[in-house]
Image (cartoon, rainbow, N blue to C red):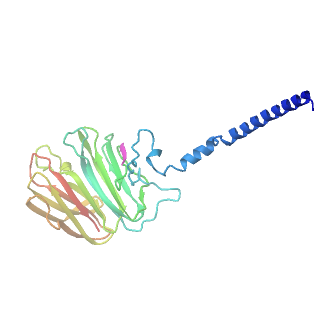
Amino acid sequence: MNDTTWRNLSAMLGVACVVLIIAAGALLATSGESPAPSQAAGSVASVIPSGSASSAPSGSSGSPAPSASTGPSSIPTPAPTGTPAANAPIAHITFNNLQLDGATDPLGKARTFTFITDGSGPVGIAITKAPTKATTRICAQIDGGKADCRTGTKVTYTGAYTDTAHSVWVVTLIGPAATGPTIDVAFSWPSHNAQITLTHGRFQGSSSPGVSQNLNGFAATFTPVASGNLTVAASWTVITTNVAVTTNQISGTSSNMVDQKQINSATNLGTPGYTFGVAAGTTYQVSLRNLSADSQRPDLTAVISIP
């Protein structure tokens, strides 16, 4: 070959080498790319332990949030299928002419009633009698859940029911002003051993000037579902006083006393308290009254058991 031919061949080989170098560089660049974004995120997530502090929101310590109450947020009412059938007898009791304290009274307290349901069945909570336009704030709570509070003259928790083995129901009542209205409040619930507890009742001697009997203990009407013993246990604060527990038999509009027990210089009804035998299907009213005059406001706790 002459010199011209060699020069041409060298130039062609040089161009070919440049092309090979560029191609090799492109291949190396491609092989060194990072994964696509979705692949990268998946790789990172796979090494973060589930529930670690890294997954907590900004500003969070990573500690678990406090658990919410396990109780219901409101009083259960029937689904389209209806209220569950009762699998225990339904107890009924009405507290008559109960005067409430007022929310703006600095010494006022909500009258509080507690009962335990057994199994499924309807539950009744209702203000059945109240002065016209006089309102009451009533709250019902189950097993420490959120209270279902309502305000009105005659308030009824229509269609309430229970569907658990046992539940604790707490009902509070108070007036909106300095003094509360005088009301009748009725309760019914499924129970094999019906018992209801009144706390923060007033036990002010109604022989004191200007004190209404409606602030003196309680009167409660009931009809036993079986024959057995009515029992009342009670205690009160502040005073030692003379008291009377009376049972009347109610027939229509007539009321006849069938038993009374008086206890002098007492701070409670003793153990086991007041007892009187009652008959199934007969309506009775039991009352507890402070017979003494006093200028204080004893706080009453009473437990009433009915067959």
Q: Residue reaching furthest left?
A: 265
What's the residue at 69%, 40% (across, down)? 28
Q: Answer above or below: position of 278 versus 33.
A: below
Q: Does the magenta stretch include residue 87?
A: no
Residue 170 versus residue 100: which sits nearer the camera? 170
* Res. 111 in view: yes
Q: Is residue 37 left or right of residue 211?
A: right
The answer to whether 21 is drawn above or below residue 113 in the figure is: above
* Residue interval drawn in magenta: 147-151
Reply above or below: 9 against 194: above
Q: Can residue 93 be seen in this view?
A: no
User: Please, which residue is most extreme toward the bottom here?
Assistant: 227
Residue 297's x, y, as percent? Answer: 14, 47
x and y percent of residue 185 in the render?
Answer: 31, 52
Quarter holding the C terminus is bottom left
Residue 8: x and y, percent?
88, 29
Q: In which quarter of the image is residue 41?
A: top right
Q: Is the magenta stretch mostly helix, strand or loop?
A: strand
Which residue is painted at 57% across and 47% down in the image?
A: 43
Determine the residue located farthest toward the top in the rendered image. Answer: 4
Q: Nearer the viewer, residue 150 or 16?
A: 16
The residue at 26%/38% (across/down) is 177
Query: Where does the N terminus fall, quadrant-wise?
Result: top right
Residue in front for this viewpoint, 158 or 245: 158
